[in-house]
């Protein structure tokens, strides 16, 4: 696995520091994985699709007095003018729902015209917050997080967006609210590039096993444009690739057909896995016994999480299909067999299991966590630092081999191997 990690880092180093879909770094990553799989004897297919590429070029937020504070521009956000936007801040007042800035009525009595509107996270989509703020006359809108770290926002319909939208942490948000009360101006520089590009999924099918009983394992191959993406998601790619290569080397055949999927454009809203699922016929979907997902399993402070196979998530609305509980149980059992304790990760819809579950396909996976904070109990279970993010380098330039946690990646990898070995031979309940 270490050799694959180093190869992905070298690819990023020679391609502007990243491996994002639609860039030369992703193309080189695709070539690397494809060549390895072809040499091992897999039937490999490139699945092309067009997508809306976006990249943040510059993001800077300055408080009155000149202090710069962290800010994250929402993906697909409109840009400020080239020299930025100088304006006063205005927090939306009222009830919790009103302060979330989701509707026109939330702005009743709020003086936001020409100002940077400050709203709270939650209650509605980023698009709805942007639309309501724009209709109220705001020059930009900043979303204040209700949890640790900044909000990583996302616009689904960039063509309908009119003003910049960005996210900040609770601490930065309170500083902005105070600046608004003082009626003092600050500055926001937010510049992004958005254009249509083409990228690919890479699908490798084992030459043996029953194709009417497929077990698909997947990990997204792309990084965000800001980083090499060694934890997000090179560690998972390396586990997946090395698993495929070792099974081929040992001529390890299985009862069910194993498929290894390396998804493109996950960082642009799960586009690769969604494209794959959308391309399947109803009969083809029924031939997938299980989908196993790997996501961010080698962060500096990662945990051992298993995707929930039982409970509907109220935020994303994802309902785990029948068979998902058995996948979650197998992952948890694999950790336990190695003397390790895992915890359940909610179905927040932020990784490639989501399109499969929404299509009624049994799915599950492993996750090490991202910007969420590790608790004292979790630090006692798994080691690492309590009170710090599971991945302090999430979507940052420091997501490199320098901050790769090989030990935690190995624990995830072993649990994945044990679970895949089970589903390679098992057959699901015939009532599905």
Image: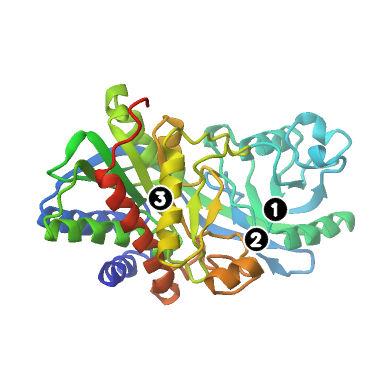
Residue 374: name its quadrant: bottom right
Q: CA distance from mark 3 to mark 2?
A: 33 Å
Q: Which residue is mark 3?
A: 330
Q: Which residue is mark 2?
A: 149
Query: Where, quadrant-wise, is the C terminus in this rendering?
Result: top left
Of tags 3 and 1, the one toward the viewer is 3
- State the residue at coordinates (82%, 48%): 91
Residue reaching furthest to the bottom = 402
Q: Position of residue 242 (x, y in %)?
A: 24, 61
Binning the other alpha carbons within 10 Å of mark 2 as few (below 14), some (14 to 19) or many (20 upward) gives many
Q: Secondary structure at mark 2?
A: loop
Q: Are marks 1 and 2 in contact (CB under 8 Å)?
A: yes
Instruction: Choose between 369 and 289: the one closer to the eye.
Output: 289
Q: Secondary structure at mark 3?
A: helix
Q: Are marks 3 and 2 in contact (CB under 8 Å)?
A: no
Residue 127 relative to residue 349: left or right? right
Residue 111 numbered tag: none
Q: Is residue 144 visible?
A: yes
Q: Position of residue 146 (x, y in %)?
A: 72, 52
Q: Which residue is mark 1?
A: 145
Query: Where, quadrant-wise, is the N terminus in this rendering?
Result: bottom left
Dot 3 or dot 1: first in sequence order is 1
């Amino acid at each position: 696995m270490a050799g694959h990690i180093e190869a992905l880092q070298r690819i990023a180093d020679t391609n502007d520091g990243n491996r994002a879909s639609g860039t030369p770094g992703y193309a080189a990553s695709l070539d690397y994985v494809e060549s390895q799989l072809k040499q091992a004897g897999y039937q490999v297919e490139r699945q092309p699709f067009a997508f809306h590429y976006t990249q943040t070029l510059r993001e800077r937020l300055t408080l009155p007095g000149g202090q710069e504070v962290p800010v994250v521009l929402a993906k697909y956000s409109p840009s400020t003018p080239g020299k930025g936007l100088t304006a006063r801040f205005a927090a939306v007042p009222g009830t919790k729902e009103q302060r979330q800035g989701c509707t026109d009525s939330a702005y009743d009595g709020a003086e936001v015209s020409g100002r940077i509107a400050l709203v709270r996270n939650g209650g509605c989509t980023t698009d709805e917050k942007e639309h309501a703020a724009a209709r109220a006359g705001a020059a930009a809108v900043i979303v204040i997080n209700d949890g640790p770290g900044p909000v990583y926002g996302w616009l689904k319909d960039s063509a309908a967006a009119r003003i910049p939208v960005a996210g900040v942490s609770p601490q930065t948000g309170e500083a902005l609210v105070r600046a608004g009360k003082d009626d003092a101006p600050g500055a926001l520089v937010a510049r992004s590039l958005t254009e249509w590009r083409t990228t690919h999924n890479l699908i490798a099918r084992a030459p043996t096993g029953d194709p009417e009983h497929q077990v698909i394992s997947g990990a997204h191959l792309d990084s965000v444009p800001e980083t090499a993406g060694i934890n997000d998601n090179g560690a998972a790619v390396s586990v997946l690739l090395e698993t495929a290569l070792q099974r081929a080397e040992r001529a390890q055949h299985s009862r069910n057909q194993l498929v290894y999927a390396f998804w493109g454009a996950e960082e642009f809203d799960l586009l690769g896995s969604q494209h794959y699922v959308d391309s399947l016929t109803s009969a083809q979907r029924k031939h997938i016994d299980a989908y196993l997902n790997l996501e961010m399993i080698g962060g500096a402070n990662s945990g051992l999480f298993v995707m929930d196979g039982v409970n509907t998530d109220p935020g994303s609305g994802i309902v785990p299909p029948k068979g998902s509980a058995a996948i979650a149980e197998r992952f948890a059992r694999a950790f336990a067999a190695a003397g390790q304790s895992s915890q359940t990760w909610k179905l927040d819809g932020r990784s490639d299991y989501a399109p499969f579950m929404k299509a009624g396909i049994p799915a599950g996976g492993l996750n090490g966590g991202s910007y969420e904070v590790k608790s004292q109990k979790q630090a006692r279970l798994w080691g690492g630092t309590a009170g710090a993010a599971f991945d302090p380098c999430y979507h940052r330039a420091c997501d490199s081999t320098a901050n790769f946690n090989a030990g935690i990646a190995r624990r995830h990898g072993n649990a994945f191997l044990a679970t895949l070995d089970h589903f390679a031979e098992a057959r699901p309940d015939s009532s599905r």
